[in-house]
Amino acid sequence: AGDIPAPDLAAAERKLDALARTVEAGDLNRAASLRDEAKQAFLDVLRAKLPPLLDKTDAALVQARRAGAKRYAPTLYEAARQWLAGALAWVSGASRIVPEHPRRGLALAEAARDMAEQVKQWRKHPDSFERLVLRARKERLMLARALNLPVDESDPLADVPVKTLTQAITRLERQLREERQARQRERDTLKAEYERRLQAETEAARQEALAAAAAQMKQLKEAFRAKLERETFETRRLKSLRKLFRKGEVNIMANLDGSVLIRLSALKFAPGKSTLDRKYFDLLRRVKQGLELYPDRKIIIEGHTDNQGDARANQRLSLKRAEGVRDFLVAAGMPAGRLKALGYGEVRPIASNDYERGRAMNRRIDIIIQPPA
């Protein structure tokens, strides 16, 4: 940035960044305004930079003129002079043409000075021009070899015309361009093939996913339908079971695991006894009918007591009472293999044993229809 104040250059760069972001965002109206602002900011920076640079360029032209550049390097000298004149005209406002490459004039002036000094050195040595000609021919031969052009190495006067070199370079450029185009076509072909395969694989994966989702949905629907049918069947079966009994005879509860509890609320035993009273035979026959509604299930008959008396005696008594119910059902025609009798005694109360009502509730027979296997 040279002598340009850092804040001015930073402000111009910020405007340029804002312009780039606005163009990317697609706000063309705002971009047009920012473009003018950014352009003006950089022109202001250039005006701040040019005056000291023009002074250096003018000084370099003076040095070149003193070195004889007007005579020995007239082309470079004139180019530097014209650039300086155009830049001064722009700074003064006489011209609207913005000078390109602010340091070009200085570089041209310095090159004119150096060229003049070199030419003067060549003029001092008579063989200098021969060396220049021979060096130029050597460089042409080196370039010809690099371009794979035929060179007669045995001929000390061998040379390759500049036109031949230019044609070879043109051919090489054309070959390189054609190779780049061929590679680009190959890349385009590979890209198109890759995109085609990717699209095909993506579509295949999508179809596979859709098929899997459809199959899963079908399975879910079938499972839901089966579950609904099973629940409907179980609901009807449980309703048929309830119809077998009068109010107060049993308490029927369906559990979440699919098991069914039949609590024989009306069934009572004499204290300390396990013998079934005949008046309960009709109830038990209806229990058998209910159990036959579940031919695919195992049955557990549980005996329970209150906490009065010896615990071990209560356990034995509860087992005998459960076995009594089981034996009745077997005698009524139920398969013995489906029935299992258990006695829990006082360990599974359903009410408090502190009151007679609770103790009466705890003295019970529960029949458990096991969940489906």
Image: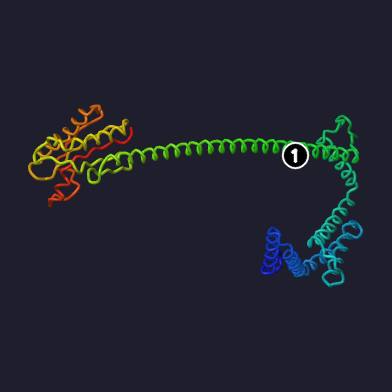
Q: Residue at x 25, y 40 (%)?
A: 262
The percent coordinates of residue 55 (x first, y second) are 80, 68
- The count of marks equals 1
Q: Label 1: which residue?
A: 184
Q: Say if 41 sits above or below 361 in the image.
A: below
Residue at the spot 21% in from the left edge and 40% down from the top edge: 366
Image coords of residue 219 (percent x, y): 48, 36
Residue 112, quarter of picture: bottom right
Q: Is residue 82 above or below residue 320?
A: below
Left or right: 280 in relation to 228: left
Residue located 56% across and 36% down the image: 211
In the rendered image, residue 268, in percent from the top left (x then y), is placed at 15, 41
Q: How is the model colour-coded?
A: rainbow
Residue nearest the viewer, comparing 212 with 317: 317
Pointer 1: residues within 10 angstroms few (<14), some, or many (20+)? few
Q: Amino acid at mark 1?
A: Gln
Q: Is residue 87 left or right of residue 30?
A: right
Residue 287: x percent and y percent?
24, 36
Tell which of 43 and 348 is nearer to you. Answer: 348
Quadrant for the C terminus in the image: top left
* Most foreground residue, 367 or 205: 367
**Quadrant of residue 33 within the rendered picture:** bottom right
